[in-house]
Image (cartoon, grey):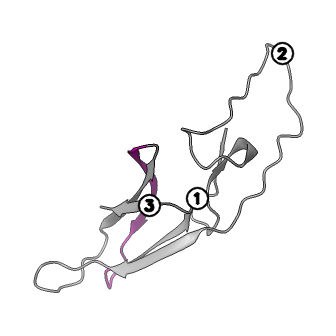
Amino acid sequence: MQFRLDGSDYAETWWKGRPSSATATALTIAKANDLRKIDVALATGAKVTGTLRNASGTSLSRASVFAYRLVAGSWQWVRTATTDAAGKYTLRGLPAGTYALR
């Protein structure tokens, strides 16, 4: 079970505080059973900011910047940001880890 608040400074987490789907705790729900006390606290994540420019140095607006995190040997998408009129972007709420931007 994944918990996230898109567009916020909070990092996503999985039930029982696991950092990724690769390490997530399985949650079994029996037919017609309600589960209670599936409580989670979201922690503030890291932030990456920058400016996207073309080869001649002109800022690029309305471009997408993708953040991928290395989890158990594979890259998993985490967040997407869109550049503003000046080419600036902010990726918020990133959990600790190793990242690649595209």
**Residue denoted by label 2:** 32
Q: Amino acid at mark 2?
A: Ala
Q: Is residue 74 found inside the magenta-colored segment of the image?
A: yes
Residue nearest the viewer, comparing 34 with 70: 70
Q: Is residue 101 left or right of residue 25?
A: left
**Residue denoted by label 3:** 98
Secondary element under disc 2, as helix, strand or loop, is: loop
Decide: few, some or many residues near mark 3? Use Cα within 10 Å; few <14, some 14-19, many ≥20: few
Secondary element under disc 3, as helix, strand or loop, is: loop
**Of marks 1 and 2, which one's residue comes earlier in the chain?**
1
Q: Residue, x 43% and y 79% (percent of image)?
A: 49
Q: CA distance from mark 2 to mark 3?
A: 40 Å
Q: Residue, x 72% and y 42% (percent of image)?
A: 15
Q: CA distance from mark 1 to mark 3?
A: 20 Å
**Residue denoted by label 1:** 6
Q: Which residues are magenta?
A: 73-88
**Spot occupied by residue 99 in the image (x, y as percentages of width and height):** 41, 61
**Of marks 2 and 3, which one's residue comes earlier in the chain?**
2
Decide: few, some or many residues near mark 2? Use Cα within 10 Å; few <14, some 14-19, many ≥20: few
Kindly identify which numbered label has been placed on residue 81: none
Q: Is residue 47 above or below residue 57?
A: above
**Of marks 1 and 3, which one's residue comes earlier in the chain?**
1
Residue nearest the viewer, comparing 37 with 8: 37
Q: Amino acid at mark 1?
A: Asp
The quadrant holding residue 67 is: bottom left
Q: CA distance from mark 1 to mark 2?
A: 30 Å
Q: Is residue 4 above or below residue 73?
A: below
Instruction: State the residue lying farthest toward the right.
Output: 36
The quadrant holding residue 7 is: bottom right
